Amino acid sequence: MGPRAPVPSRCVILTRPDGQSGALAAALQAQGIDSFAFPLLHIAAQADAAALAALDTALNDLCAYALAVFVSPNAVAHALSRLVFLKSSAGATSVNTGATGATGAKRANAATGAAGAVASATAYWPVSLPVAVVGPGSAQALADAGISPPQHHVIVPPGGPDARFDSEALLAELDVAALAGRRVLIVRGDGGRELLADTFRAAGAQVDIVSAYTRRAPAPDSAVWAALEARLTSSVPCAWVLTSSEAVRHLATMLAARYGTQEGVHTPGTPHVLAQILAAPCFTSHARIADAARAAGFDRITQCAAGDENLLAALKTWADPIQVKHDDR
């Protein structure tokens, strides 16, 4: 009989979009830390006909750009899936000419959601087109698709203990003045910060912004809420991992809807549950996310260095005091 696995003595609530917390959950489990997935963002392939038309136009004209910027791993995955579809699928013509209605939307979703197709994107990406990304997650998504040095010029903010992975850090790595009079492509989801686009335009660049995916607030059912509440009110201490300020705002809205008042009266028991939710420590990797968490009512907020390895180290440090006591019993 082999050694017994450590019994989890702490739990981490992971809030990334569905399917994007697996690696961190596994790393936590290896440290004897349990995790609970409670996604605060729902990511879906772009299906709006006008948005798809703009995306397709840009992807079919990549050689016209001096720089392409992907703002997230989701932008990389969905845009490159779309690129592969456009270049390799026999149905590309009908999509490019503006397939609309239910059939066109279904076709677009199926095409853009084909994650496996991304692996062949390097065959269609111009070697001469530099790619800029905000952080290592996006750089890894590009590498998974075959777009990486030395064949391709990939620009990403440097790592290290003081690393920042945001628009400001990326701009510091770019020769923005050299983009004057040239075209720049920004690939993102619906909406987002305008700092990159505004900076490029101020330098005289022509900027095209396209949306490769959509983001929206999730709608957890009663069973998911019950499971979350059971975790947070149990004897096992819990912490939140918050990796998006938009996601934190969704959480604040969801908490207000579930635990708010009707005619000035709380649902029985909810003030206690809400207090426990907000009393749980939060771990973030950016000041904007910490500010959003504070605005949502959290007050035990730890901002660690960017990157999952730093997040994991901070969570392990938080868990260690109880882990030691538990292992000595």
Image: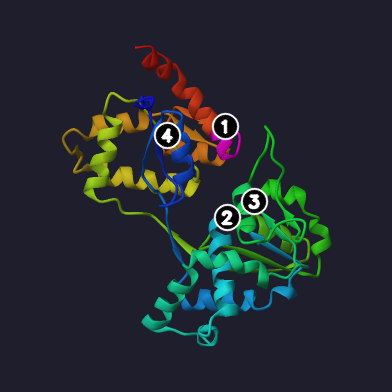
Alpha carbon of mark 2 to alpha carbon of mark 1: how far?
20 Å
Q: Nearer the viewer, residue 221 or 182?
A: 221
Residue 313, above or below 126: above
Quick one: label 2 or label 1, which is nearer the N terminus?
2
The residue carrying mark 3 is 134
User: Quick one: which residue is furthest to the left in this view?
Assistant: 268
Residue 260 visible in the shown view: no
Q: What element carries label 1?
A: loop
Residue 102 visible in the shown view: yes
Q: Which amino acid does label 2 sit on?
A: Ser
Name the image quarter holding residue 79.
bottom right
Quick one: label 3 or label 1, which is nearer the N terminus?
3
The residue carrying mark 1 is 304
Q: Which of 130 and 242 is in front in this view?
A: 130
Q: Residue 251: horizontal and vertical position, in percent?
A: 38, 45
Q: Is mark 4 on a helix, strand or loop?
A: helix
